[in-house]
Amino acid sequence: MKDISIGLVTPAAIGRRWLDAFKRVAPHLKVLLNDEITDPGAIELLLVWKHQKGVLAPFENVKLLYSLGAGVDHLLADPDLPKNVPICRIVDPLLSFSMSNYIIYAVLEFQRRMDKYRKDQQTGTWDHYAPPERTIHIGVLGLGYLGQDAACKLTGLGFDVSGYSLSPKNIPNINCYHGAQLDSFLTAVNVLVCTVPYTKKTHALLNQSLFNKLPKGSYLINVARGKVQVASDILAALDSGQLAGAFLDVFETEPLPSDSPFWQHPKVNITPHIASITNPEAGVQQIMANWQRLQQRKPLDNQVNLQKGY
C-alpha cells in the first residue's frame, strides 16, 4: 500500500487508543491526531468521532471519511461535511457481541425481578413465594446489524421476540413488523429495546405518545442515541406506571448532568454510554481494507446511505 495521509479528529483520549491500534496493526502508516494535522489539505483518509463543528471545512482533498463507530449522526449534522466523499462506519462483530450482551443483561434484570431481590437483601427479607419471573414479550425497535444480532440471541434464549424496521425483514423465529405496522408492533410487546439510528425521523421517537401504545407496565431499554428519547416523557411514564422501569445507556445531554432526575430515580438503571465500544484494532483492519477497495474502485463495505441517514 502506498503511503497515504491519515488524519484523526476526535477527543484526545479516544484518539490515542486509535493511534496505538494503528501502531500495532499498520505500523508503517503515519497517522496524525488533531493539532498534529498542520496541513488539512494533504489528508486523504479522515477518521472522525465527536468532532467540533467547523473543523471539517479545511479538509478539502479527503477521499474517504470514516465514523469511528456505528453511528454517523454527528457527521451528517455538520454543514461542513465534505461533498461527494464516501462515508463509511465501523461494523465490528465485537461491537455486536458487547451490545447484545448488554441488552440481554438489561432484559434479564427486568424479567428476573432483580430490583426486587436487591431491595429484599437490603431489608433482610426472604421472599421465596413471590413469582420470581415476569412474563415478557420483547420488541426490538430497529432491526439493523446490532438490532438483529440482539433479537436473534434473545430468541435463542427462548424469549418471544418481535422486531420492527422501516423496510420488510424476514428473520427466522422473530415476528417482523415494518412500515405502517408500528402501532401493532408496540401493542404486542412489553419490553421495548430501542436500537434505531439517530435520524430526523427518529428524533424524539421515544415519547409519551409512543409509550401510551405499549401495554401498561412495560419496560424500556434504550441503547440507541440520547436524542431518540424525550427524558421528561420517560419520567412522566415512569411516575404514572405506564412504564415499569427503564434501562438507559444514552441521554439527550452527555455526560448526564448531575441534577438529572435519572440519577436517583428508583425505577431507572443508567450506564454512561458504554453498551458497546468500538474495538480500535478491528476498526483499523476494516478501514484499511476499505481504503484498498476505494483504490481498486470496488464497492465499499458499510458505506452510509445519505438519503436514509445511516
Image (tube, rainbow, N blue to C red):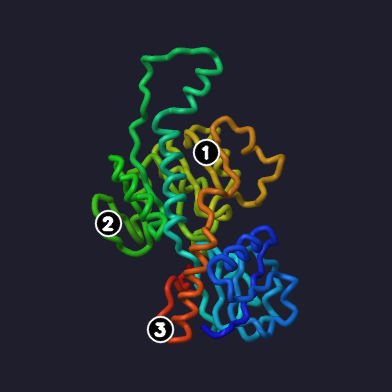
From this view, report whether residue 37 is shown above or below residue 111: below
* Amino acid on which the number 2 mark rests in the picture: Ile
From this view, report whether residue 215 is shown above or below residue 178: above
Closer to the camera, 277 or 199?
Answer: 277
Q: Which mark is residue 132?
A: none
Can you identify the residue that label 2 sits on?
171
Can you identify the residue that label 3 sits on?
298
The x and y percentages for residue 81 are 62, 77
Few, some or many C-alpha atoms within 10 Å of disc 3 (few <14, some 14-19, many ≥20)? few
The x and y percentages for residue 196 are 46, 57
Few, some or many C-alpha atoms within 10 Å of disc 1 (few <14, some 14-19, many ≥20)? many
Closer to the camera, 257 or 300?
Answer: 300
- Lower position in the chain sequence, tag 1 or tag 3: 1
Q: Residue at x 46, y 28 (%)?
A: 114
Secondary structure beneath label 1: helix
Q: Are marks 1 and 3 in contact (CB under 8 Å)?
A: no
Secondary structure beneath label 3: loop
Q: Is residue 83 visible?
A: no
For the residues labelled 2 and 3, the Cα–Cα distance comes to 29 Å
For the residues labelled 2 and 1, the Cα–Cα distance comes to 31 Å
Q: Residue at x 52, y 58 (%)?
A: 279
Judge from the rendering whether residue 301 lies leftward or rightward of residue 59; answer left or right: left
From this view, report whether residue 61 is shown above or below residue 148: below
From this view, report whether residue 194 is shown above or below residue 74: above
Judge from the rendering whether residue 259 lies leftward or rightward of residue 201; answer left or right: right
Q: Residue at x 74, y 73 (%)?
A: 36
Counting the numbered discs, the total is 3
The x and y percentages for residue 93 are 42, 58
Can you identify the residue that label 1 sits on?
237
Q: Is residue 300 visible?
A: yes
